[in-house]
Image (cartoon, grey):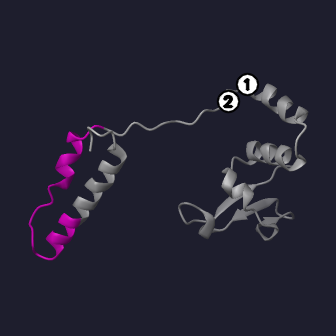
Amino acid sequence: MEKRGVTDKLKKVHQRCGEVWTYAIITGRAEYNPAPDLASAFIPHQREHYAHLSVDELPEFLRAIDKYMGSQIVRTALRMLILTGVRPGELRKVEWSEIDLDKAVWTISAERMKMRRSHYVPWSD
């Protein structure tokens, strides 16, 4: 798998092997789980980091949003992404029932979150 460059899949296979060995120990079919010992033999998966703006680039980007002649919805969404730090998919699926204007907070339900925990996004004045 390393030769094919699928190191992210290798990690998952390694985890599953560890689970199988743990099950074997619990059910009395094995006395030792060799999977943890193999971890140091694997080449670590190299993650790609997404492009981002530097602090110096942000003012020009905000000016470009203001000059944008397209949809007002797109312009507003871009600003909201910057101000809240939420993922684009979370912003796209926002519902008015999630927003409490009195408390100035947007509560994203656990069902919509990757980690299955509610996420609270404060609104600024």
Where residue 52 sits in the image (x, y, percent)? 63, 32
In this rendering, position of residue 46 left or right of residue 122: left
Say which residue label 2 marks: 53
Where residue 70 sits in the image (x, y, percent)? 88, 41
Quarter of the image holding residue 35?
Answer: bottom left
Q: Are marks 1 and 2 in contact (CB under 8 Å)?
A: yes
Quarter of the image holding residue 66?
Answer: top right
For residue 29, above or below residue 106: below
Residue situated in front as seen by the camera: 121 or 71: 71
For residue 88, above or below residue 44: below
SS label for mark 2 = loop
Say which residue label 1 marks: 57
For residue 36, above or below residue 30: above
Q: Is residue 122 magenta?
A: no
SS label for mark 1 = loop
- Identify the magenta region: 20-43
